[in-house]
Image (cartoon, grey):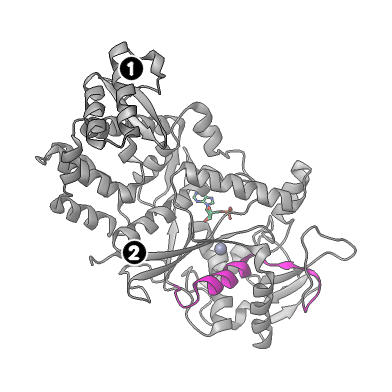
Amino acid sequence: MTKIFLYNTLTRQKEEFIPIKEKSVGLYTCGPTVYNYAHLGNLRAYLFDDFLKRILQYNGYTVKHVMNITDVGHLTGDMDMGEDKLELGAKREGKSAWEIARFYEEAFKKDLAALNIKPADVYSRATDNIPEQIALIEKLVEKGYTYQTSDGLYFDTSLVKDYNKLSHLPLEELKEGARVEVNTEKKNPTDFALWKFSPVGTKRQMEWASPWGTGFPGWHIECSAMSLKYLNQQLDIHCGGVDHINIHHTNEIAQSETATGEPFFNYWLHNGFLNIAGGKKMAKSADNFLTLENALIKKGINPLAFRFAALQVSYRKPMEYSETGIQQAAEGLESLYSWVASLKESLSATEMKNAQVDLGFKEKFLAAINDDLNTPQALAVLFSLKKSKLTKADLWATIIDFDQVFGLKLEQAQSFSSELKLADLPMEVQSLVIARHTARDNKDWSESDRLREAIKKQGYLLEDDQDTFRIYRIKN
Ligand code: AMP
Ligand code: ZN
């Protein structure tokens, strides 16, 4: 196996990736808070997760991918103050918090599919794992790392020696960051809620009984409880956006390592922000919030143009979003599709069957992707194929091989018109299509292939779709 190097926030170095088990990887990626649509910034984070997962798989690893769905407990303030985002969403839309959670979880999964992001093996909702979170908190209580205030049960961060090991920031700076919200009952500004009580006299829509009182889990505990539950002995890689380093992931590590006495995940990878041109971070709370639907789909732009744009930037660097940028990406993707489609259409079935992935180019491709996911370089390798002396068939095979990582659906690239009806076709093509349909019905595959080629010679592409077929005119 070729070595893979990943930049680990924990050590601040590019390190060789060595999984706990030999051939499989446990991957945990922080998922969405489902109180609104995901914005393009969030989707950049999930695209990064997908590039990473595909690269691991391309290298021959089996990946067990777990993603949480935060459907309770993520408050508007990062330091456990403010309103639950789910209840906020419910108020905004006049629905229940449960309805909001399920609606935006579905919307999120639709976005993933539109971006050709492979689904996780496990999607775990915070609300489906309350007993696991309570059990983990109980361990922390037993070990003496918690204290109670009037609004919840807190984790005492001053008891953890290496609390700042992920952020690499002086403790004073972490404390300063945490002082933005004042909670006078906390012993240290960086302490965080493990369990919050339902406010006295009110019944929350989402609340559960616990040994400390009725309430709901703090945001960080869900990721610890669910990664330990679903990945168990395979805590290899944990991902999220850079905004998670100083608080969310720092707290996940503190509470998990305290509870288990073992290291919690060996590799911590963080993606850079998507910024609106000019440098402002895209955020759900800000007015610069663009969804895949509004920014691309409604404008008739292929959502994969955003995927193509994300591949052009190193995942750790900030990515700038602008309308012109996305238009350019869409055009770039179109021209990539027409190159690949013309290759595909020039190949006979036999040529395609015998096509070979070029090992020299594959080596260059691997060197790029295994160098901390250098996708811009991997694209450069793809485009350098244009000038190569490979046969068309081998070119095709090599491109399709690379697309296992890019996920741009290059195999389906087409340079033809939208679908046509049989009646739109010239008479002689109609007869060929009908004859081919009969040949297929009779399972006469060689005749069916011959007729398909004859149709292609007339300038039409025929694609089978279960019992029926689609037909397109090939553009010149
Ligand atoms: P949230 O739904 O707010 O919990 O965020 C989901 C994921 O999106 C997390 O991994 C965040 O770090 C990431 N994220 C949030 N905003 C951005 C942004 N503007 N650019 C890139 N990633 C982001
Ligand atoms: Zn998380």
Residue 193 on image: x %, y %: 69, 70
| Nearest to the observer: residue 97 or residue 192 | 97
Q: Which mark is residue 41?
A: none
Q: Residue at x 43, y 45 (%)?
A: 116
Q: Is residue 422 left or right of residue 286?
A: left
* Amino acid type of the residue that numbered disc 2 sits on in the rendered structure: Leu
Q: Is residue 85 left or right of residue 66?
A: right
Q: Is residue 290 left or right of residue 374?
A: right
- Choose mark 2 or mark 1, whichever is in front: 1
Is there any visible trace of residue 102 in the rendered image?
A: yes
| Nearest to the observer: residue 233 or residue 460 | 460
**Residue 216 lies in the magenta-colored region:** yes
Q: Quadrant of residue 115?
A: top left
Q: State whether residue 297 is above or below residue 13.
A: above
Q: Secondary structure at mark 2?
A: strand
Q: Residues within 10 Å of mark 1 (few under 14, many from 20)?
A: some
Residue 140 on image: x %, y %: 65, 82
Q: Residue at x 51, y 79 (%)?
A: 162
Q: State whether residue 393 is above or below residue 458.
A: below
Q: Residue at x 38, y 32 (%)?
A: 330
Residue at the top extreme, as displayed: 427
Q: State whether residue 265 is above or below residue 399.
A: below
Residue 351 on image: x %, y %: 16, 39
Is there any visible trace of residue 281 in the rendered image?
A: no
Q: Residue at x 26, y 28 (%)?
A: 452
Q: Is residue 123 left or right of residue 342?
A: right
Count of numbered labels shown in the rendering: 2
| Nearest to the observer: residue 466 or residue 458 | 466
According to the image, label 2 marks what residue?
A: 6
Residue 172 on image: x %, y %: 56, 71
According to the image, label 1 marks what residue?
A: 430
Magenta-colored span: 211-235
